[in-house]
Image: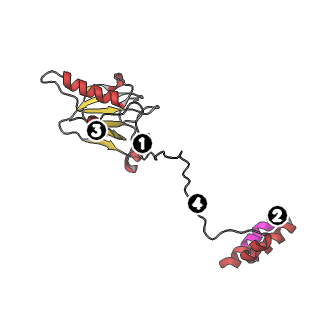
Amino acid sequence: MKSTGYMGSVLCFRVILLTHLPACSVGLLVKALESDWAVLSENIGLWIPAEVTNPEQDDRPEGQEEQEEETLPGPPVPQECHAELHTDYDGVAVRWGLTHRKESAADCCQACLDHAKRAKPGELQCNIWVYCPAENGCYSPDIYEHKNMECWLKYAEKPKLNFKDRYSEAYRNSHPNAPVVVPWAAGVVR
């Protein structure tokens, strides 16, 4: 026997309930299911509003502005560093980051600026810095485990992004250990 619609559903529900509930409970449940829900709700004192609005609470101390932008830990990064959160630039490493740690992104950028000033004629001058601010380290699709405070100094004639903001779903599908958000901070100094 095939039943359709509300009454068919109630009938199927009755058969299932009859095998699992005591008879007195089944009778009450069937009566509730067959009743007019609006009337039943009113009879038991249940009121559900047609629309629920949840106003946003502003619990900041008075006069404090909302911080819209995410910031890097440590001292502010100078404007000449062109710091970009969730960014990784490609380039030739002029200072290997696995063994080059800095306390902050500002220090990493300063190391890049200093490297460029001290570079001898014919040597590649740092024009890209890439820093790992994440306490648990930063993901990269290479064989290394990148740690917090790694500072990579790089050079590229025409700086090119490796990754920006988020790794794509397609990328994450082929690199299952990749997080959603690019953990690196980087900048191009001119």
Q: Which mark is residue 55?
A: none
Of the residues under marks 4 and 3, which one precedes in the sequence? 4
Label 3 – label 2 distance at C-alpha: 69 Å
Q: Secondary structure at mark 2?
A: loop
Nearer to us in this view, 152 or 65: 65
Q: Reading the chain from its start, which is encountered first: label 1 or label 3?
A: 1
Image quadrant in which you'd find residue 46: bottom right
**In this rendering, the label closer to the viewer, 2 or 1:** 1
User: Do the numbered discs 2 and 1 sit on residues whose CB atoms are within 8 Å?
Assistant: no
| Residue marked by disc 4 | 54
Q: CA distance from mark 4 to mark 3?
A: 39 Å
Which residue is painted at 35% across and 22% down in the image? 99
Find residue 82 and name its label: 3
Residue at mark 2: 21
Q: Quadrant of the N terminus?
A: bottom right
Farthest-out residue, left: 121
- Regarding mark 1 in the picture, which secondary structure is present there? loop
Q: Magenta segment, principal secondary structure? A: helix
| Earlier-in-chain disc, 4 versus 2 | 2
* Tag 3 near tag 2, CB within 8 Å: no
Of the numbered discs 1 and 4, the one sitting upstream in the chain is 4
User: Mark 2 to mark 1: distance in Å?
Assistant: 55 Å
Q: Quadrant of residue 107?
A: top left
Query: What crowding class fits label 4: few (fewer than 14 Cα within 10 Å), some (14-19), or many (20 or more)?
Result: few
Q: Residues within 10 Å of mark 3 (few under 14, many from 20)?
A: some
Above or below, 136 relative to 41: above
Q: CA distance from mark 1 to mark 3?
A: 15 Å
Q: Residue at x 41, y 33 (%)?
A: 133
- Label ID, residue 70: 1
